[in-house]
Amino acid sequence: MDRDRVQTWASIAEIVSALAIVVSLVYAGYQFRRSTTLSSSDAAAVLIERFRESNKLLIESPGLAKIVLAGRARSADLSEADRLRYRTFEREFFNTWEAAWLYHADGILDAPTWADLDDYFAVAAKRRPARVWVQVREDFPEEPFRAHVDSVMGTE
């Protein structure tokens, strides 16, 4: 009789142990999903900070603002040093767009946040002359990203 009782308790312990494993796996999945959501928020925060830094440069440097305006009108009229500043400033815009693209492609940036950011980038890109993208396009090795920007800019 004692042997049957021990075997019953052993069976109950196995069942409880199996349930505990299932519960811990469900919890681990929940934590992983929560971690991914936080990463999406962090990625969006990084991108927003990059926008802010770019805007801050324009606000705090009237010389850069003049270079950007002149470059968008006709970059050939800029000095070599100013053309370099202008191209670097514009490249940073596309770098930030590419970072968002890669965050989304890697599954870090969720689809709704990516869609909102991509819409913003598309509108901002269309305010730039298409030649700006053509001049910096070679600096971006990710072909899917280049094809995406080409389609937005009409430079396919």
Image: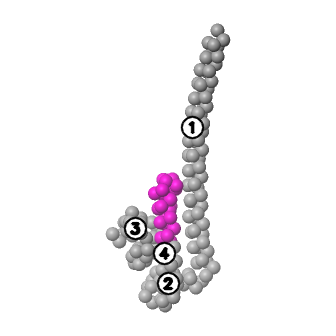
Residue 146 tag number: 3
Badge 3 density bin: few <14, some 14–19, many ≥20, Cα 10 Å? many
Residue bearing mark 2: 84
Residue bearing mark 4: 91
Q: How far apart are the alpha carbons under marks 3 and 2?
A: 21 Å
**Amino acid under label 1?**
Leu
- Applied colour scheme: one colour
Q: How many marks?
A: 4
**Amino acid under label 4?**
Arg
Q: Say which of marks 2 and 1 sits in front.
A: 1
Q: Which residues are magenta?
A: 93-121
Residues at circles 2 and 1 in contact by the CB criterion of under 8 Å: no
Looking at the picture, how far across and down is residue 40, in whole percent? 56, 55
Q: Residue at horizontal 61%, vertical 16%? A: 8
Magenta run includes residue 140: no
Residue bearing mark 1: 25
Q: How far apart are the alpha carbons under marks 4 and 3?
A: 13 Å
Residue 100 tag number: none
**Amino acid under label 3?**
Arg
Tell me the SS state at disc 1.
helix
Looking at the picture, how far across and down is residue 134, in whole percent? 39, 76
Q: How far apart are the alpha carbons under marks 1 and 3?
A: 40 Å
Badge 1 density bin: few <14, some 14–19, many ≥20, Cα 10 Å? few
Q: How far apart are the alpha carbons under marks 4 and 2?
A: 10 Å
- Quarter that holds the C terminus: bottom left
Tell me the SS state at disc 3.
helix
Magenta run includes residue 120: yes
